[in-house]
Image: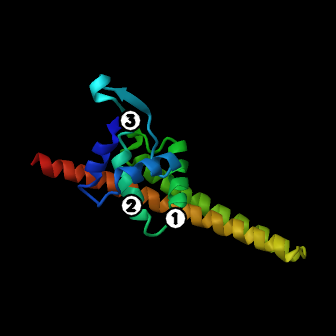
Amino acid sequence: MIEIKTAINKAAKVIDPPPKTTVNRWSKKGYVSNMIEFANYGAAGGRIGQYPDRLPAELITTVRLKEKYRLSQIGQARQYLADKNLLEEKAGSGSELEAELVFKTLDYNDKVAEGREKISQLAEQGAEPDEIQKAVRELNDQMQLHEVIEDYIREYLQAVEDLENETLSKAN
């Protein structure tokens, strides 16, 4: 586990990180991991929140992606991967994330084909324009989420690598 200040300092070696208040807000909204527990440092030290060790990589990923996507979309992609335990340290080797990227691509192609088929069927059946537009919006939303998840995986893997390279360069 890692303290938020330490996570920000690690991320600062790779990117210009947001201030602690922003990271706290992002954490509460699910754009990055939330606090796991408090560490009690006694009366003088107080209680300090402990976060998953992956927080620096998530900060780097979020900062890089927020130029292209809304924070809510980034949070949705992060949550999708977290729900599948693909961001856990044991999965941090990248192979499971890369496999998920392949799976998402195959799944995406199937979903797009299904969505297009549904839209074609609605048009052939003479469905109301609102119903067809709703199906098109759903397909577009699904395509957008897939794109965000793909980009999140790529950026997260790059962030992990950048952090490792930073650590290695300090050791030399």
Displayed quadrant of residue 141: bottom right
Q: Residue at x 27, y 26 (%)?
A: 44
Q: In the rendering, at what x and y percent does residue 94 appear?
A: 38, 49
Amino acid at pointer 3:
Gly
Q: In the rendering, at what x and y percent does residue 112 appear?
A: 66, 66
- Residue position for label 2: 63
Q: In the rendering, at what x and y percent does residue 26 appear?
A: 46, 51
Residue 49 is marked as 3
Comparing 92 with 60, the one in front is 60
Displayed quadrant of residue 126: bottom right
Outermost residue to the left: 172
Cα separation, mark 3 vs mark 2, equals 22 Å
Amino acid at pointer 2:
Val
Outermost residue to the top: 42
Q: Is residue 154 above or below residue 140?
A: above
Q: Is residue 151 visible?
A: yes
> Looking at the image, is mark 3 or mark 1 earlier in the sequence?
3
Q: Is residue 121 visible?
A: no
- Say what secondary structure mark 1 lies in: loop
Comparing 171 with 56, the one in front is 56
Q: Is residue 37 left or right of residue 136?
A: left
- Residue position for label 1: 70
Colour scheme of the rendered structure: rainbow
Looking at the image, do the residues carrying marks 3 and 1 touch, with CB atoms under 8 Å apart?
Answer: no
Comparing 155 with 7, the one in front is 7
Local packing at callout 3 (Cα closer than 10 Å; few below 14, some 14-19, many 20+) is some
Q: In the rendering, at what x and y percent does residue 107 appear?
A: 61, 58
- Say what secondary structure mark 2 lies in: helix
Cα separation, mark 2 vs mark 1, equals 11 Å
Cα separation, mark 3 vs mark 1, equals 26 Å
Q: Quadrant of the N terminus?
A: top left
